[in-house]
Image: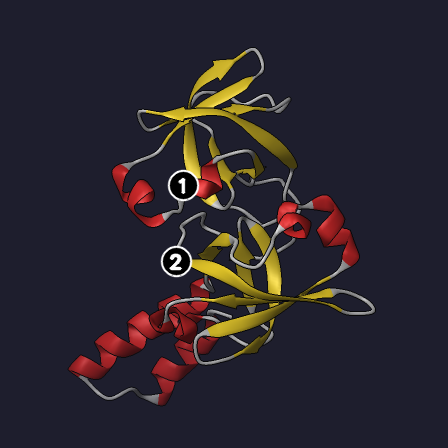
Amino acid sequence: MFTGLIREIATVKRYANNILSIRSPYKAKVGDSIAVNGVCLTVIRVNPDGFDLELADETRSIIDESKIRGKVHIEPAMQLDDRFEGHVVQGHVDCIGTVTSITTRSNGTDYIIKVEPNSIAYIIPKGSITIDGVSLTVNEVYNESFRLTIIPHTLRETLIGDYKVGTKVNIETDLFARYIDHILQHRSAKKPMSWDDVDKIQALY
C-alpha cells in the first residue's frame, strides 16, 4: 500500500526486456514494492546507483511508455509504523488520462484531464485521486474529464509543473468508489439492497 506522497524524483537509466533500471539514492532491497509514477513494481536487483524493477505484461498493456522514461516519481511501499498521510493508494493504474487544459490562477494552477467515459464514475468531486503516483483532490468532474487545482508547493516538488497540454498521466481512481460500485452491481443482480447493506458500505469510509 502507498500514500501518494512522493519520496523523490528519480531517473530512468534504461528500459528493455520488461526490466526498468532506476538511478536513485534510495536504498532498496530485493523484493521491495516501489511505486514508479504510480505503478507498483517489485525490485529484482539492487545496483550501486539504484535498482531494477520488473514490469508484468498486464502492467505494460495498461500504462503509457512515456511514463517510464526520463524523470519519474517514486514512493516505497508504506511500512506498518509509518505515519499515514495522503490517501489509500494501491499502485494499480486504472486508466491513462490526457492533460487538455492548463490555466494559471493566483494561488494555484488548474489542470483539466480527460479520461475514458467509463472511468468517470470512479472520480468523485472533492474525492481523492492519484496522478502519476501523486495524491491529489478532485475539484470538479465533467462528462469525460475532471479538474485539479495544484498548489505551488506541489508544482515545485513534483513533475506536475512540467506537464503540458497533451501530456499522458497514470491515473488510479478512488479505491472505495470502485469497491462500492462492485458491491452494488453484484448485489443488485442477486437481491435488492437493505438498509443494513447501505450501513455496511458507509462503514467503509
Residue 81 in picture, x, y percent from top left: 61, 40
Q: Is residue 74 above or below residue 205?
A: above
What's under tag 2, amino acid-wise? Cys
Residue 122 in picture, x, y percent from top left: 42, 71
The numbered mark at residue 95 is 2
* Number of on-image labels: 2
Q: Position of 73 compared to 204: left or right?
A: right
Mark 1: few/some/many CA within 10 Å (<14, 14-19, 20+):
few
The numbered mark at residue 65 is 1
Q: Earlier in the sequence, mark 1 or mark 2?
A: 1
Residue closer to the observer: 5 or 103 = 103
Q: Residue at (27%, 43%) from the top-left corner? A: 58
Q: Is residue 84 visible?
A: no
Residue 141 in picture, x, y percent from top left: 53, 77
Residue closer to the observer: 133 or 85 = 133
Q: Quadrant of residue 198?
A: bottom left
Residue located farthest toward the top when viewing the structure as drawn: 48
The numbered mark at residue 77 is none
Q: Residue at (78%, 53%) from the top-left corner? A: 153
What's under tag 1, amino acid-wise? Glu
Residue located farthest toward the left when viewing the structure as drawn: 190
Residue closer to the observer: 199 or 190 = 190
